[in-house]
Amino acid sequence: MTTRIPLMIGAVASALLSGCAASDDASGRFLVQPDRYQLYGCKELAEAAQAIGARQRELEGLMAKVGPDTSGRFVSTIAYRPEYLQLRGLINEIHRTSAEKKCKFSPDAASGAHVSDQAIR
């Protein structure tokens, strides 16, 4: 019985640590509800992509500001990384939804340019 507890702790720890090796996109997908933007039109998708892109750039600046050393990476991972991964998941979901709706904008290039409310037919 006592040998099972360390074995179970080791199994749980390895399962949790294996998530650390997952890609950012896979982690982002895990943090976002599927079909979140299904009811959005092309214009709303563009606006959401623009707002998310602005926040992503802000977080990237904050992560760069804390520095590349070990303590900076630790602070960045704890303070900014979870939100950053969630934003990447949201952008991926916007990509998917805009492709399904055949919108005329690129979520990557949604930088405030005029975006039509019409879909490509």
Image (tube, helix red, strand yellow):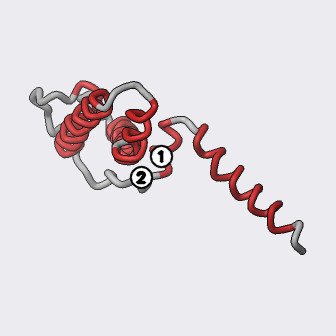
The image quadrant where one finds the C terminus is top left
Q: Is residue 14 left or right of residue 1?
A: left
Query: Residue 13's quadrant in the figure?
Result: bottom right
Residue 111 visible in the displayed image: yes
x then y, percent, for residue 34: 44, 53
Instruction: Identify which residue, 7 or 98, lies in the foreground.
Output: 7
Who's the residue at 90% across and 74% down the image? 1
Q: Which residue is mark 2?
A: 32
Query: Residue 77's quadrant in the figure?
Result: top left
Is residue 66 positioned above or below 82 on the image?
Answer: above
x then y, percent, for residue 96: 40, 39
Q: Is residue 43 left or right of residue 17?
A: left
Is residue 68 positioned above or below 43 on the image?
Answer: above
x then y, percent, for residue 50: 19, 36
**Distance from the alpha carbon under mark 2 to that under mark 1:** 5 Å
Residue 100 visible in the displayed image: no
Residue type at the position of mark 2: Val
Q: Residues within 10 Å of mark 2 (few under 14, many from 20)?
A: some
Q: Which residue is mark 1?
A: 29
Is residue 114 positioned above or below 15 on the image?
Answer: above
Q: Residues within 10 Å of mark 1 (few under 14, many from 20)?
A: some
Q: Is residue 17 left or right of residue 77?
A: right
Element class at badge 2: loop
Element class at badge 1: helix
x then y, percent, for residue 20: 58, 42
- Whether the residues at callouts 2 and 1 have beta carbons within 8 Å, the answer is yes
Who's the residue at 26% across and 34% down the image? 62
Instruction: Identify which residue, 44 or 89, lies in the foreground.
Output: 89
Who's the residue at 34% across and 39% down the image? 91
